[in-house]
Image: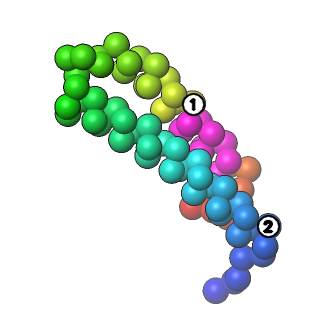
Amino acid sequence: MNELTPEQKESKKQLAKYKRKVVELAGVMHDIVEDTIWQDYDKLPKLSEDILVAMDDVNKFKQEHPYLK
């Protein structure tokens, strides 16, 4: 198995940050749906857009760094 170069390791860390952002946003959406839908439903469209943008960031980064999964 090949070791990652320092640049690849840094890219892997950056990908993890992008992914963490998506998971955090999804967690906020989950909390609204599960706990406060009646008060916070108006936040869902913006949150959905934020998730789409964050997922686009992940996918673009993965395309630019095909050795990452």
**Residue visible at 57% across and 57% down in the picture:** 16
* For residue 38, side relative to residue 11 (left or right): left
Query: Where is residue 20 shown, x and y percent of the image?
Result: 51, 50
Q: Dot 1: few (<14), some (14–19), or many (≥20) neighbours within 10 Å?
A: few
Where does the magenta region start and end? Answer: 54-62
Q: Quadrant of residue 58?
A: top right
* For residue 55, side relative to residue 32 (left or right): right
Q: Nearer the viewer, residue 24 or 63?
A: 24
Q: Which label is found at residue 7?
A: 2
Query: Where is residue 29 shown, x and y percent of the image?
Result: 34, 32
Q: Are marks 2 and 1 in contact (CB under 8 Å)?
A: no
**Residue visible at 43% across and 46% down in the picture:** 23
How much space separates mark 2 and mark 1, taking CA atoms? 25 Å
Residue assigned mark 1: 53
Q: Is residue 66 above or below residue 55?
A: below
* For residue 8, side relative to residue 15 (left or right): right
Q: Is residue 4 above or below residue 8?
A: below
